[in-house]
Every structure is written in C-alpha cells, then in structure tokens.
Image: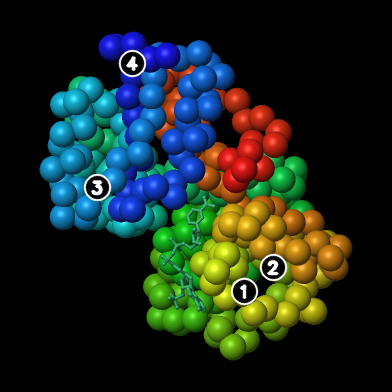
Amino acid sequence: MISGQAMLAGVIGWPVGHSLSPKLHNRWIEEAALDAAYVPLAVMPENLAEALRGLPRAGFRGFNLTVPHKEAALWLLDEVDAVAQAIGAVNTVIVCEGKLLGTNTDHLGFIHNLQAKAGDLAPFKRRTVVIGAGGAARAVVYGLRSAGFEEIVITNRTQARAETLASQFDAEVVAWEKRAEALEGATLVINASSLGLAGRGALDLSLDALPKESLVADVVYTPLMTDLLVRAKAQGNPVATGLGMLVYQAAPGFAAWFGRKPAIAPGLEEWLLS
Ligand code: NDP
C-alpha cells in the first residue's frame, strides 16, 4: 500500500511498456517495506523536455531514462556529470533541490554483473574483444577502462563507429570481417551489439580461436542464454548473462531516491523474465 506521501520515481521511455525496471524497483520497494512507487512513464521524444521539467514539480525524487531518450537528456538537464558525458548518455536522474542531476550507471551495471558472475576479474583483464559500438558498447568500454582492463579491441559492422569509440578510449579496431580471428588470445569477449536478441539474427561469430578459459559475456538478455552464450558454454568457457547489467545499473538510482541499498537476491534475473 502506498500513502499520499509516497516517494516517487520512474522510467521514461518511448515506448516503455517493455521495460523491466518497474517490476525490479517495485520488488525492491516491497522487500524494504517502503512507502514508495516506481512507475513507467511513456513520453514521446518531442515531449521529453516538458516532462523532465514537470516531474520534480510533481514530487518525483528522480527517474531512469531509456530508449530513445538517453542521449537527448544530455542537453536538457541542469547538470550532467563527467561519467554521463564520457559515455554520451544519461540513464539516471536525481532531483536535488528542484534541479535535475544526470549520471550514467550502465558501466557499473556491466562491471558489477561481471564480478557477480565470474568472481575475481583479474584473470580476464589482459585482452578484451568488444562486439558492437552503439550505446551499450560505449558504457561497456567505459566500464572496462575504469576497472583497469588492459588491451581492448572493438569490432563493429560500421567501422567508423568503432573507430570513434576506440579513439576516445584508447582501444584497437579490428575489421568486422576479421572478428573471429580477433578472438585469438582474448581473455574476455563481450557481445555489446543487438545481435542475438530474440527475433533478430544471431551473432555470426566462430569461437574456434577463443581459448577455453576465456570469459564470454552478452549484454543481450532476451533470451537470457543467447546463442553466443550457449555455444561458449558448450565448449567449456565460463559465461556471464546480460540481465544482471540491468539489475546492477538500477541499484545506485534506487539508493539515491529511496535511501536504501537494494538486495540482489539469487534468482532475480530468472524472476524478472518470468
Ligand atoms: P544501438 O542501436 O546503439 O547499437 C546497436 C549495435 O548493434 C551497433 O553496434 C550495431 O552496429 C549492431 N548491430 C545491429 N544490427 C546488426 C547487424 N544486423 N549486424 C551487425 N551488427 C549489428 O543499441 P544499444 O547499444 O543501445 O543496444 C544494444 C543491445 O544491448 C540491445 O539488445 C539492448 O537491449 C542491449 N542492452 C542491454 C543492457 C543491459 O542492461 N543488459 C543495457 C543497454 C542495452 P552498427 O553500428 O553497424 O549499426
């Protein structure tokens, strides 16, 4: 039950009906017995600026931004921190004395999920191959650099996008046609493209050159075990599913808005997709 003084937060997207964030945050609210609610907010791109201004006035403590608003918000908030600027997108907004402060927690979500799945990341830091150069890849590469990963190689269908990302984060680019060869000597491989998403094509990537002890991670989480992860697991590689990235990126926002650190229980990912 929520009262008239309930603490409010939400997620703004267009469309937003597919977002798992309301299910996740409202479970954490229930577990902590908070007088709070987290709601989906369907806002068209042309209405974003107006909606952003209205939410603090309606008592919201903050919100998440999802597709297609993450980049546009950079120009519409009162302050955007250095992390969001470097990633080029805002996913979390905190209302502070009526002002909108934007940050990005996707990189933390990615690294914390990897730690939760693989434990000590030290053995996987030598050479990382990142597939993709879109929004998710930007957060992933920022996270890898912040966490001290050494060589980073980026491969993307549109090479110019890979080059822009690589030049910002001191990474190397491998041509899309050479992606399978790039896996030789890799200690970590990440699919940060949208390939593998249910209903889209699978990622066409031979794993023959990949050492068997290398960690394979995916940011795609529908299905939880993508074709890439199924094949990697079958040949004995450790794997990290992608939904944990969504869970771990959500935790800092929850803590900032509601004053509690949420518990990340075993089985949460499967429950979210159920
Ligand atoms: P973008 O649209 O920004 O980027 C898409 C990426 O996929 C680009 O690198 C694009 O290459 C590549 N791609 C798309 N179609 C093809 C294709 N047919 N062949 C080769 N490459 C292709 O999307 P995002 O980066 O925002 O999202 C990517 C995925 O990550 C989505 O599935 C999204 O759901 C997931 N995601 C997961 C998160 C999590 O919490 N687990 C968080 C954010 C995203 P090109 O540049 O050539 O177009």
**Inter-mark Cα distance, 2 to 4:** 43 Å
Secondary structure category for the residue under label 3: loop
Mark nearer the N terminus (1 vs 2): 1
Q: Quadrant of residue 155?
A: bottom right
Mark 3 surroundings within 10 Å by alpha-carbon count, few (fewer than 14), some (14 through 19), many (20 or more): many
Q: Which residue is mark 2?
A: 227
Q: Are marks 3 and 4 in contact (CB under 8 Å)?
A: no
Establish if 193 lies above or below 265: below
Query: CB of mark 2 within 8 Å of CB of mark 4?
Result: no
Earlier residue among tags 2 and 4 = 4
Residue at horizontal 58%, vertical 41%? Answer: 272
Q: Is residue 51 above or below residue 18?
A: above
- Is residue 171 at all visible to an observer of this figure? no
> Residues under labels 3 and 2: Cα distance?
33 Å
In the shown orientation, is residue 77 left or right of residue 13? left
The amino acid type found where label 2 is placed reads Asp
Instruction: Report the residue marked by disc 3.
Output: 43
The Cα–Cα distance between marks 1 and 2, rounded to whole angstroms, is 7 Å
Question: Of 183 and 248, which appears nearest the observer?
Answer: 248
Outermost residue toward the bottom? Answer: 177
Give the Cα separation between the discs numbered 3 and 4. 22 Å
Disc 3 marks a residue whose amino acid type is Val
* Disc ID at residue 202: 1
Q: Indicate the position of residue 50 as horizontal and vertical percent values.
A: 13, 43
The kind of residue tagged 4 is Ala
Check contact, mark 3 vs mark 2: CB within 8 A: no
- Looking at the image, can residue 143 be seen? yes
User: Where's the C terminus, which quadrant?
Assistant: top right
How far across and how far down the image is residue 168, in percent?
41, 65
